Amino acid sequence: MSKYFDNPNNVNENNINNAGTPIDDGSGYKKPTNLLNALSVIQRLFVIETRTDEDLPSEYFTIEQIWDFFKVGFKSGFLESLIFITLLPFLQTIYPSFKYFFFHEKLNENELLILQTISFLPIIFSTIYLVYLSKYYKGNITRRALISLFTGRSFAFLIKGIIIFLMFKWFYYISYEYPEKVWDLIDFMRWIINLFLPYNIDNNIVYNYYFTFIAPALEKTAKEILVTMFFFALLPYITIFLKGFTKYSKIKRARKYFDNY
């Protein structure tokens, strides 16, 4: 076993640097570039903190490391939200309505369930991964690392959710207040739709399709995306809060039992 762990009292700033954590000695620090890197760093921090009798000062995890973990979380959240806002409207609104309107084929309940599941899979898997990370929420340093990571991801979710909500609301407003602009857009992009059809269609058909299925769904989809983004942005924090509350309750019960004994 490493000499740094033989005696917990020997753990100091230099030991943390040599153990490969993000605490920099001027040359050994490597910035995490993705969630897997961040997990590896947090695992090392967790091992160090579990082998010390006293909490290490949170200042060991410097502002630079906080910013690096925030950026990793932000980039991850930005990519997740981008995939989600692409899949959700396409799989739950555009694809089913397109198939029904142009091919006269209606999806059954099982197909709709599969599409809904696929829409949320990326964001669910990522959230489960971050919830898993909460098991390392122990000492001052690991808490700081996890909070930085979660905050970056949540910040990206909230920003993207608000932007998409406002953008869809704007499209909804333009569609009904200025339908001539929709017509111009359809006239410009009709060739794209023709690529997916065995026959050519004119602007009137696309215009009818848009105002029958797409435009009415814009407002509902905007609200659904916003609510989903907020929920998955807050879920990791809720997990940490429940974990901390459970740990505090156990300690309180143990002290009460010891006092009564």
Image (cartoon, helix red, strand yellow):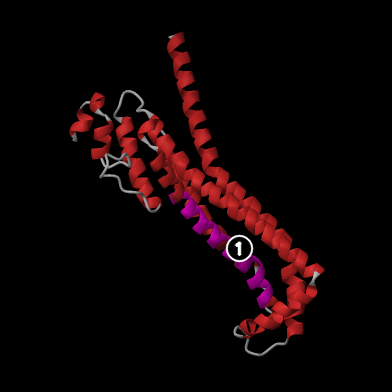
* Residue at the far right in the pictured view: 177
Count of all numbered marks drawn on residues in the image: 1
Q: Is residue 193 above or below residue 229?
A: below
Q: The magenta stretch spans which residues?
A: 72-99
* Residue at the far bottom in the pictured view: 199
- In the foreground, 191 or 209: 191
Q: Is residue 127 above or below residue 243?
A: below
Residue 140, x across and y down, in percent: 40, 31
Q: Residue at x 45, y 15 (%)?
A: 255
Asked whether residue 91 is drawn in magenta, I would say yes
Q: Which residue is mark 1?
A: 88
Asked whether residue 3 is drawn in magenta, I would say no
Q: Is residue 221 above or below residue 51?
A: below
- Prevailing secondary structure class for the magenta stretch in the rendered image: helix
Residue 184, x across and y down, in percent: 73, 79
Describe residue 135's horizontal placement relative to residue 165 as left or right. left
Q: Residue at x 36, y 41 (%)?
A: 42
Task: Inspect this view and state whether residue 224 appears.
Answer: yes
Q: Residue at x 61, y 82 (%)?
A: 192
Q: Amino acid at mark 1?
A: Leu
Q: Which quarter of the image is occupied by the N terminus?
A: top left
Task: Inspect this view and state whether residue 217 appears.
Answer: no
Residue 11, x across and y down, in percent: 26, 29
Q: Is residue 18 above or below residue 218?
A: above
Q: Which quarter of the image is occupied by the C terminus?
A: top left
Q: Quadrant of residue 166?
A: bottom right
Q: Residue at x 19, y 35 (%)?
A: 2
- In the foreground, 85 or 99: 85
Residue 146, x across and y down, in percent: 44, 40
